Image: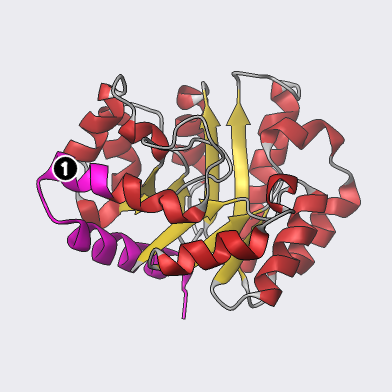
Amino acid sequence: MFIDSHAHLDGQSFDGDREAVLQRARDAGISAIINVGFDMPSCRSTLALAEAHPEIYAAVGIHPHDAATVKEDDFAQLHQWAAHPKVVAVGEIGLDYYRNLSPRDLQREVFLRQIALARKVAKPIIIHDRDAHGEIMDILRQEFYDVPGGVMHCYSGSAEMAAEIVKMGLYISIAGPVTFANNRKLGEVVEQIELGRLLIETDAPYLTPEPHRGKRNESAFVRFVAEKIAEIKKISVEEVASVTSANTRRLFGLD
């Protein structure tokens, strides 16, 4: 049984066939899905989806793209949502210096405030990091204390950075790009980091793995990520499924 540790199945691209997508996930052996909010509307829809489906859990947070639109009342609402029994993490939160859709100083402020929120509610964090590796690491070195765990979602850094992240007590989540023929760097991360610190994810509807690249991603496709990890590590897919599922359950405190 697999767990998709990061998806956005509440999004509009699934409005026409969401129940069919969830059934395909069940048929593919997906036992649980962490559905992740990224702004206030998506946090509401994520929580509603988790309440409607026993295999879906929610994370609530403000993505760095939306940092400039956050209102003070939003932090109080996030705090309230984070106390919900089906909310298992604060995320996705972090920095995105690739698209820079919000000013960098506001991205940092909102990231720091949400780490503090995770500390208060005793929930792990789901971190978005795009072209901000150095600053993300500086913040984690200073602020990742009294937070009950975390994961670097859709990891894109170096093997050396991954090793430091693991030493801090965080997990590394591997997504569809590991299946791309030209992504040798991520393959090196998978090869060097012990399976006990890895999660698998789809980030659906984004980052679709081979052999479905170019189409909409969905949770059933997390198997292709697991198969690539198994190939790189020269172990069975069943072992990847078992260990990454146990890792995910441990991190997020799943039943």
Answer whether residue 198 is visible to the viewer in this image. Answer: yes
Residue 50 to residue 165: above or below? below
Indicate the position of residue 146 as horizontal and vertical percent values: 50, 59
Instruction: Say which of 208 and 47 sits in front.
Output: 208
Instruction: Say which of 108 and 94 sits in front.
Output: 94
Q: What element carries label 1?
A: helix
Residue in view at x 54 percent, y 61 percent: 34
Which residue corresponds to mark 1?
231
With 192 as the anchor, is 108 left or right in this view? right
Q: What's under tag 1, amino acid-wise?
A: Glu
**Range of residues picked out in magenta:** 227-255
Residue 199 to residue 3: above or below? above
With 52 as the anchor, is 205 left or right in this view? left
Quadrant location, the N terminus:
bottom left
Residue 229: in magenta span: yes
Indicate the position of residue 162 as horizontal and vertical percent values: 31, 36
Q: Residues within 10 Å of mark 1 (few under 14, many from 20)?
A: few
Identify the image's colour scheme: rainbow, by chain, secondary structure or one colour: secondary structure
Indicate the position of residue 218 as horizontal and vertical percent values: 52, 50
Of helix, strand and loop, which mostly describes the magenta segment? Answer: helix
Residue in view at x 71 percent, y 35 percent: 109
